[in-house]
């Protein structure tokens, strides 16, 4: 026998091995998926729940406590879902603005020359980040907003009234013991928004802090020695550089805020998830409801990502 | 000379305070406003906590908060488990202390024994009193605490006498204890079955969190490796899985687990609601852990894997012995961060009708006897979650500095 180096058998050959492994893997996954889908089809057929979308046109039969679009129980399910989606969008957009403002404030406060303020900013972040959001939402709703006074005792500022029945804006008036105003937000909305803003602001503060810390000290010193005021230094010199680090970090925080808005159900706000849950309980259409839910949140995530990527393109350093 | 030393310290402290709080006129005004607000808030809180709040709701429901509706006549199993846990903790503590040179494991333990023991003692003595537990239960808690200290002392005193082969086997105690614990909790092997629907409160929260943390980590590592693999099927499979999970809110996935999983499996094969939620939590967290681990994998230079492969190590061994130890060290803070949010996410179980800590709290609130005691209960839950999360975070930071002794952050610490 000559000792000619033989190529290894085909099942150990480097050239085929990866494909062999992947082929077997694909086969396994295919079998599992086929098994699950067969079960799904069998189970759905057995219960008469095969995929169909016609139920979306049937009257919903439930009322929503709070909508922007006109809605009542006689309108179809798809309009209920739409109203829920609009509610979700409302709270997400308001939450993004609020959390960004508060987060930036707290993030910059950790660079204050005032030691007390600096420590309070750290304490805020460490306290809020380590308590579950759901617990915070429930706390805001049941402990804070639901114990607000009502009627005459409501908290009143010029043009603003905060009562148990909601937040009233634009010359509110007490008519028969009930507050009325052109613009009203419910306490459910208020609790959800407050909870989301307070929670997300802690994370955004960390992102902002990291961004500002990434700007070398020399930049501050140089700007100050040129005679720029601290505020102007921050706006003209530090922020443009910090934003390059901050914007990508904000993106993921914004997306988690959008996803966290689905916890609205804990404080009684009728967002998309809560409408979907009611719809499922009434129709039993689990698959369709699930697809709508996943699809909607995916689209919201993608839109936020696209906007933030565009913003990122604007703030990044353009080099020749 | 010696008598002036404290004076100097005091002066510098005062000066530092003055500089930090009243450095400029704006700072001074700000400090006064903040101090006033803090004082008002603090006074208000203490007045509420001492005179208005009714803490009896916690003591009256302590069993419910601890174990949910776990059958009373079977609760001795949980006591036994707690006793075993205390014993194992004490033994590990003492042995680790007796053999300080054992590398990475040492980093898992508190630096200062006396402080740790003192804090434990205060908690163990004060908590049962504060909760107004019945004398029998108080005595049990104190006994368990004494057992822990005794085990620690015994292991520290006689640990050196144990032959090395047995000592090597000692860490296996923990996985063994986990299995024993599962049997004790759920029954089987001659014990009466206690179905998961009767677990609740802290027991359910801790079980779900440990189960999901233990399982999501290996899954996450596999997914992260898959995402960086050169095999397209593996890579795309991992990418699709990770992005799908990360694109959906956890609550919709829990909802999927509760409502759709039953359709996907043949009739009767679907696991219990509690286990369904546990698996959803695990698979959810795995996607996030995968991203954390990936950030560590990216930090390992490609030359490491190439060098290992060129030395003839097969791919799995090269990954396990060369790449992963370096990657996981870098990924440690992010991974523990994910564990912390997983612990927080267990509260979402209450939204799909499980009676974890938060779910139990909500049922207690619904009881007319305890109506309006929201603030007390939720405050205590918040403190509990906060301390667990902070402890995890501190532990991870300590571990990080001890695992990377040459990193700049460790030198500073």
Image (cartoon, rainbow, N blue to C red):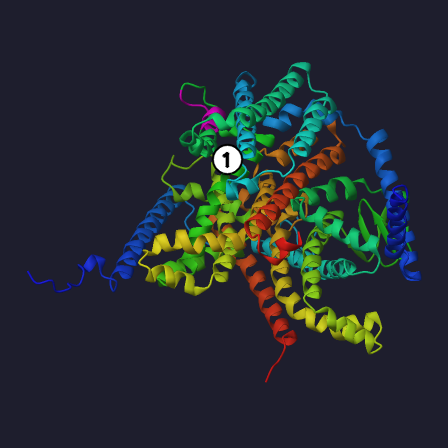
- Residue placed at 35% from the left, 53% from the top? B316
Q: Chain of mark 1?
A: B
Q: Is residue B215 left or right of residue B405?
A: left
Dominant SS in magenta? helix
Stretch of the chain drawn in magenta: B180-189
Residue hosting label 1:
B274
- Residue placed at 79% from the left, 51% from the top? A120
* In front of the other: B297 or A34: B297
Instruction: Find residue A245 and report its image quarter.
Output: bottom right
* In front of the other: B118 or A162: B118
Looking at the image, residue B285 lies above or below residue A298: above
Looking at the image, residue A39 lies above or below residue B89: below
From where the camera sits, is residue A56 visible? no
* In front of the other: A39 or B175: B175
Residue projecting furthest to the top: B136
Instruction: Find residue B136 and report its image quarter.
Output: top right
């Amino acid at each position: 026998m000559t000792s000619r180096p033989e190529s290894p058998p085909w099942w150990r050959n480097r050239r085929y091995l990866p494909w062999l492994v992947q082929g077997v893997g694909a086969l396994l996954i295919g079998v599992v998926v086929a098994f699950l889908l067969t079960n799904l089809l069998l189970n759905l057929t057995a219960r008469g729940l095969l995929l169909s979308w016609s139920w979306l046109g049937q009257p919903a039969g439930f009322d929503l406590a709070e909508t922007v679009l006109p809605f009542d129980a006689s309108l179809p399910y798809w309009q209920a879902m739409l109203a829920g989606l609009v509610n979700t969008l409302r709270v997400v957009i308001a939450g993004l603005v609020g959390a960004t403002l508060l987060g930036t404030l707290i993030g910059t406060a950790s660079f204050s020359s005032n030691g007390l303020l600096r420590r309070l900013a750290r304490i805020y972040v460490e306290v809020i980040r380590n308590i579950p959001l759901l617990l915070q939402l429930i706390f805001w709703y049941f402990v804070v907003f639901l114990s607000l006074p009502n009627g005459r005792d409501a908290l009143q500022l010029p043009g603003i009234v905060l009562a148990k029945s909601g937040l009233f804006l634009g010359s509110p008036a007490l008519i028969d013991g009930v507050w009325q105003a052109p613009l009203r937000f419910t306490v459910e909305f208020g609790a959800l928004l407050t909870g989301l803003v307070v929670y997300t602001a802690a994370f955004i503060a960390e992102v902002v802090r990291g961004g500002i810390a990434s700007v070398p000290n020399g930049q501050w010193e140089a700007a100050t020695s040129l005679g720029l005021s601290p505020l102007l230094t921050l706006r003209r010199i530090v922020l443009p550089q910090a934003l390059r680090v901050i914007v990508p970090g904000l993106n993921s925080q914004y997306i988690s805020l959008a996803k966290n808005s689905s916890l609205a159900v804990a404080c009684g706000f009728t967002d998309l998830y809560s409408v979907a849950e009611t719809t499922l309980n009434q129709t039993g259409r689990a698959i369709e409801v699930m697809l709508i839910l996943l699809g909607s949140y995916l689209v919201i995530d993608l839109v936020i990502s696209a906007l933030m990527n565009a913003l990122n393109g604007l703030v990044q350093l353009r080099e020749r | 000379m010696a008598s002036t030393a404290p004076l100097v310290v005091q002066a510098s402290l005062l000066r530092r305070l003055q500089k930090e709080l009243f450095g400029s006129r704006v700072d001074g005004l700000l400090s006064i406003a903040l101090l006033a607000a803090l004082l008002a808030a603090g006074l208000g809180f203490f007045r509420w906590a001492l005179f208005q709040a009714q803490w009896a709701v916690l003591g009256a429901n302590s069993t419910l908060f601890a174990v949910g509706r776990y059958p009373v006549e079977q609760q001795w199993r949980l006591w036994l488990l707690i006793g075993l846990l205390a014993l194992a903790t004490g033994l590990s503590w003492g042995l680790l202390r007796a053999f300080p040179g054992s590398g990475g494991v040492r980093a898992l333990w508190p630096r200062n024994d006396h402080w740790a023991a003192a804090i434990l003692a205060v908690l163990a003595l004060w908590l049962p009193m504060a909760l107004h537990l019945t004398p029998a239960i108080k005595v049990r808690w104190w006994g368990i605490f004494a057992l822990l200290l005794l085990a620690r002392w015994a292991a520290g005193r006689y640990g050196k006498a144990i032959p090395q082969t047995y000592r090597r086997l000692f860490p296996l105690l923990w996985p063994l204890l986990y299995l024993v614990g599962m049997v004790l909790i759920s029954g089987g092997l001659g014990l009466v079955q206690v179905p998961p629907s009767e677990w609740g409160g802290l027991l359910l929260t801790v079980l779900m969190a440990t189960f999901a943390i233990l399982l999501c980590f290996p899954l996450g590592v596999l997914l992260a490796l898959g995402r960086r693999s050169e095999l397209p099927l593996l890579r795309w499979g991992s990418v699709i899985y990770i992005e799908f999970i990360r694109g959906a809110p956890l609550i919709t996935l829990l909802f999927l687990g509760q409502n759709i999983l039953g359709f996907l499996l043949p009739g009767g094969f679907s696991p219990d609601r509690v286990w369904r939620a546990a698996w959803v939590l695990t698979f959810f967290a795995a996607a996030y852990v995968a991203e954390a681990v990936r950030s560590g994998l990216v930090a390992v230079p490609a030359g490491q894997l190439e060098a290992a492969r060129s030395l003839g190590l097969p791919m799995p061994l090269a990954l396990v012995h060369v790449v992963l130890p370096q990657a996981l060290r870098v990924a440690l803070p992010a991974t523990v961060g994910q564990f912390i949010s997983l612990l927080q996410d267990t509260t979402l179980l209450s939204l799909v009708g499980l009676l974890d800590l938060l779910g139990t709290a909500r049922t207690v609130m619904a009881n007319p006897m305890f109506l309006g005691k929201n603030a007390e209960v939720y405050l205590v839950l918040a403190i509990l979650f906060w301390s667990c999360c902070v402890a995890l975070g501190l532990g991870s930071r300590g571990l990080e500095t001890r695992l990377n002794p040459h990193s700049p952050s460790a030198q500073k610490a």
